Amino acid sequence: MKSSSARMMEYAGKALVSVWLAGLLALTGCVTTSSSPDASSKEELTPERQAEIVKRRFQERWDALIAKDYAKAYSYLSPSTRALVPQEQFTARFSRGNFKKAEFKEIACKEDVCEVSFLLTYDHAAMKGVVTPTGEKWFFRDGEAWFNLPD
């Protein structure tokens, strides 16, 4: 039979190992939580940050449409939209437009959706330099802003 001091040493050793393992598991949990893409992207994507991202991508997309770079403009469509709308169909639809300028006015982001208001300048067969106030909705998925074609 073990002496009481031997049992105390064995118990203390097991307790120390348990505390060490609990600490290790806690640290592992912290590392896993802080490095997960969902946690970091949620923290970074404040409405202000979303607005910055969408404003940049909005302008890049419209610059591509104005330059008639339809392949680049197509790349701003959400993956689900690209799965439904072939690039050739997109190009045929937008190549009829004679876009001249997209002037950003304002943006409002709530949750994972941003609404952009802007002035679109284009040439029509009957008139040049037509300016139309319009808007677009952009949404976030997997940390990136995407545009969907309206119905």
Image: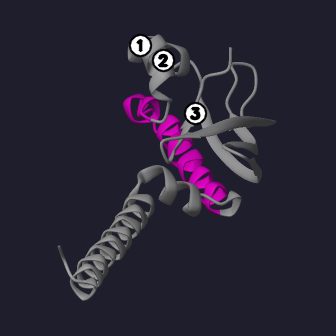
Q: Residue at x 57, y 49 (%)?
A: 59
Pointer 3 and pointer 1: residues touching (CB < 8 Å)?
no
Answer few, some or many: residues within 10 Å of disc 1's Cα (few below 14, many 20 plus, some between 14 and 19).
Answer: few
Q: Earlier in the sequence, mark 3 or mark 2?
A: 2
- Write down the residue under mark 2: 90
Q: Is residue 64 magenta?
A: yes
Q: Which mark is residue 147?
A: 3
Q: Main secondary structure of the magenta part?
A: helix
Q: Tell me the residue at 33%/70% (across/down).
A: 18
Real-space Cα separation, disc 3 to disc 1, in angstroms:
15 Å
Q: Picture quarter containing residue 14?
A: bottom left
Q: Sort mark 2 into few (<14), some (14-19) or many (20+) by Cα contacts within 10 Å.
A: some
Decide if residue 132 is in sight here.
no
Q: Does the magenta run of residues contain 42?
A: no
Q: Magenta residues, as a range?
A: 49-75
> Do the CB atoms of the residues marked 3 and 2 lie less than 8 Å apart?
no
**Residue 86 bears which disc, if any?**
1
The x and y percentages for residue 66 are: 53, 38
125 sits to left or right of 30: right
Determine which quarter of the picture holds residue 117: top right
Instruction: Work out which residue is located at the far right of the displayed protein and give it.
Output: 133
* Residue 68 seen in the current view: yes
Of 78 and 30, nearer the camera is: 30
Q: Whole-percent x and y of residue 42?
A: 57, 55
Q: Amino acid at mark 3?
A: Phe
Three-letter amino acid code of the residue under disc 1: Pro
Please state which of the two labelled residues, at mark 1 or mark 2, is closer to the viewer.
Answer: 1
Identify the residue at horizontal 48%, vertical 36% (top origin). Answer: 76
Question: Contact, CB < 8 Å: mark 1 with mark 2?
Answer: yes
